[in-house]
Amino acid sequence: MPVNNYEKVWHNGKFIPWAEATVHVAAHVISYASCLFEGIRCYETPQGPAIFRLKEHTDRLVNSCKIYRMDLSFTREQLAQAMVELVRVNNVKHCYIRPVVFRGYGEVGVNPLKNPIEIYLLAWEWGKYLGDEALRHGVDVCISSWQRIAPNTLPAMAKAAANYMNAQLIKMEALTNGYVEGISLDSAGHVSEGSGENLFLIRDGKIITPPLSASVLPGITRDSVMTLAQEIGYPVSEQEVSREMLYIADEVFFTGTAAEITPIRSVDRIVVGKGQPGPITRKLQERFLSIVQGQAEDKYGWLTLCSQPVAAGR
Ligand SMILES: Cc1ncc(COP(=O)(O)O)c(C=O)c1O
């Protein structure tokens, strides 16, 4: 098994064994990358497993499908409920949930419209994406020579498999050159995001993140961090970021479902601030983790407890 997976998979409304969640190689998605997906964390909390921002992830999935003209035969509420059931039937304490929607086996040409739409919900165990040390001490990253997808090429607001061919180039180049992660610039040369993370910088007590027009994925952790930053007295400004602003920032960090809040200690081997996680990054990290792990009050209603019925609208 490639991952530490959980046994039951939800497929188009039914639970099937992991080993049966397979696809024919002639499926449209294999040749043409016609797949939209999500990555969602379900945290272990004292009240049982809790899915983080289930509604927002489900909304983003449905929006990604809408952009690619895929009509789903399940409502947002049904999909959200199915994810809660996925956690329950697999009897997990915590997991990573991966919904995938793709064009399946049917016609073999580029035209996707006649192929069936398949929806799968999978779950597996996933620790810290960039490593435990990364969260504590920060990571060394580089600016990629690969540019992020330009507007009018592939829509960055959709979490589409095709976008991750670009992300793979960024990631492989970074790893080959001894970095943990790469940051791409957008087609205008401004900072966009990491291969699988949004990016924030702090300078003179101001928090800045690139706007959605910089071809970034509208990250749900990004949105959560904007809320928490406001709460601790640092409203975030969405503005263009030039590469060199990262070099002279006091603090820089990544956000993402997988990366959570990961400090960045150097960019292109130029040390950021003091070369260790800064005080604002730390504060945001602590606040974020205490909410998602159910240690602090869930004042923004971000957690869906899987041991209780799903509330209407969540
Ligand atoms: C390209 C990209 N940007 C940003 C993010 C962060 O988004 P989120 O916080 O919703 O996981 C991800 C992760 O899904 C990503 O793949």
Image (cartoon, rainbow, N blue to C red):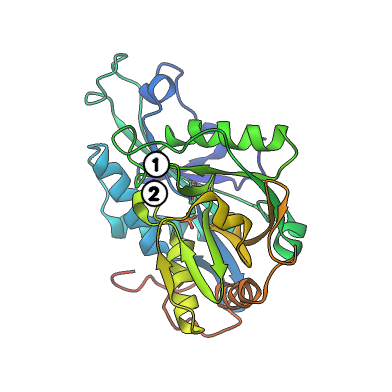
* Image x and y of residue 58, in percent: 36, 56
Quadrant occupied by the N terminus: top right
Q: Disc 1 and disc 2: Cα gap in Å?
A: 8 Å
Q: Position of residue 215 (x, y in %)?
A: 39, 46
Report the residue marked by disc 1: 188
Would you say residue 94 is visible in this rendering?
Answer: no
Query: Which quadrant of the figure contains the C terminus?
Result: bottom left
* Residue 127 position within the rendered picture, expressed as x and y whole percent measured from the top left: 68, 55
- Taking depth in this image into account, of 234 and 312 the one nearest to the observer is 234
Q: Residue drawn 48% across and 41% down? A: 16
- Residue 163 vertical placement versus 215 (above, below): above
Quadrant in the rendering for residue 100: top left
Disc 2 crowd rating (10 Å Cα; few below 14, some 14-19, many 20+) is many
Examine the rendered structure and indicate whether residue 105 appears above or below residue 3: above
Q: Amino acid at mark 1?
A: Ala
In this rendering, the answer to whether 117 lies above or below 125 is above
Quick check: can you spot residue 217? yes
Q: Residue at x 56, y 33 (%)?
A: 145
Q: Which residue is mark 2?
A: 214
Q: Is residue 133 left or right of residue 3?
A: right
Q: Earlier in the sequence, mark 1 or mark 2?
A: 1
Residue lying at 43% horizontally and 36% vertically, measured from the top left: 163
| Secondary structure beneath label 2 | helix
- Considering depth in this image, is 168 or 24 the residue closer to the camera? 168
Cβ(mark 1) to ligand 1 < 8 Å?
no
Instruction: State yes or no: Cβ of the residue under disc 2 lies below 8 Å from any atom of ligand 1.
Output: no
Q: Image quadrant of residue 81?
A: bottom left
Contact? badges 1 and 2 (CB < 8 Å)? yes
Amino acid of disc 2: Ala
Residue in the foreground of this view, choosing between 312 and 212: 212
Residue at the image position 58 percent from the left and 38 percent from the top: 144
Q: Residues within 10 Å of mark 1 (few under 14, many from 20)?
A: few
